[in-house]
Image: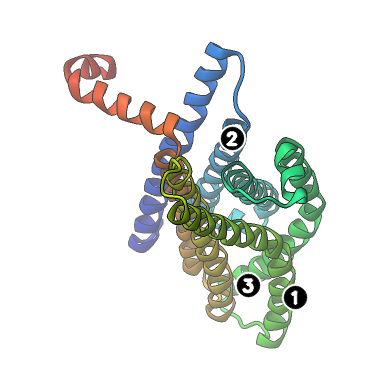
Amino acid sequence: MPSGIENAFLVATIGGFLIGMLGSGFIVLVNCIDLVKRQKLSSADYILTGLAISRISQLWVILCDSFLLVLWPHLYATDKKVVSIFWTLSNHLAIWFATCLSVFYFFKVASFSHRCFTWLQWRIRSVVLVLLLGSLSLLFLNSESIYMFNHISTNSYKIYARNSTWSSDVSETHYLHHLIAFNFINLIPFLLSLTSLLLLFLSLMRHIRNLQLNPSSKDLSTEAHKRAMKMVMSFFFLFIIHVSSILLTDWVFLKLQGHLVRLVVLLTSTVFPSSHSFILILGNSKLRQNAVGLLWYLNCHPKRVKSLAS
């Protein structure tokens, strides 16, 4: 029987799962309805839809992993490989879709006179496609890194169940290899997002300076810059928290060698996909208008909503 702490972590994980599914499911639903009505979607909507689908997959994997660890711990050490494969794939795609969204916002909003920037700006769809295809080449390294840590955690869990000890030197050596590979894989999306954020800030500063030098010109770009910077900055900081929490909890897991720490890892894993989905909704005008319209409908028609629910 699960303990009280395990049940609490499981309930918290389910709560994060439901919140994340609500946000990501809303994004997919709105874009699918828009696709049916207009027979087309913008490049940003395609990226948002791919990101939301990968987030939904990621949340389902986290939920399955939580139930497996709490309710069937005797199967956790043997059936973890399949879960790890799906988690690696969904997490990798989610990070890279979000990175492509940051790059897309940068090219759509920023303004530079350099010919290279103009050439890439006119080919933004190709740039995003190349980034996504290029990320697949890193997927193999990512899977090897995750497999390495799962091998460590599985052995550690078996040893924990037998009330025995494992050599800390072996644990730390494998963790160091995992740390190097994991940081290398996430370095590229980190640098791309950081570069997009810094260049957006530089473009905004140049735009403000031009307005000060030429007060008669119309300010059509400042708000667009600010919205894009908020979107990129939100992903950038959540991405840092996400990666840092994984590395930190991995280290704590190896030191403590207990499955309760694994529950903490799973719980923190829901924070990034759940919170970022609502930031994307607030930052996208179409999604925000649909969300406001849905809230208005639910608020103005409570009786109809209750009848539909019953």
Q: Where in the figure is residue 10, as x and y percent of width and height?
A: 40, 53
Q: Is residue 156 above or below residue 79?
A: below
Disc 1 and disc 3: Cα gap in Å?
A: 17 Å
Dot 2 and dot 3 residues touching (CB under 8 Å): no
Earlier sequence position, callout 1 versus callout 3 = 3
Q: Residues within 10 Å of mark 1 (few under 14, many from 20)?
A: few
Earlier sequence position, callout 2 versus callout 3 = 2
Circle 2 or circle 3, nearest the eye: 2
Earlier sequence position, callout 2 versus callout 1 = 2
Front one among 232 and 62: 232
* Residue type marked 2: Ala
Split into 4 quadrants, where in the image is the C terminus?
A: top left
Q: Identify the element where label 1 is drawn.
A: helix
What residue is disc 2 on?
A: 44
Instruction: Write the residue at 70% across / 49% down.
Output: 85
Dot 2 and dot 1 residues touching (CB under 8 Å): no
Disc 2 and disc 3: Cα gap in Å?
A: 43 Å
Q: Is residue 116 left or right of residue 103?
A: right
What residue is disc 3 on?
A: 156
Disc 2 and disc 1: Cα gap in Å?
A: 36 Å
Instruction: Write the residue at 51% across / 53% down.
Output: 207
* Residue type marked 1: His
Q: Is residue 133 left or right of residue 84?
A: right
What residue is disc 1 on?
A: 177
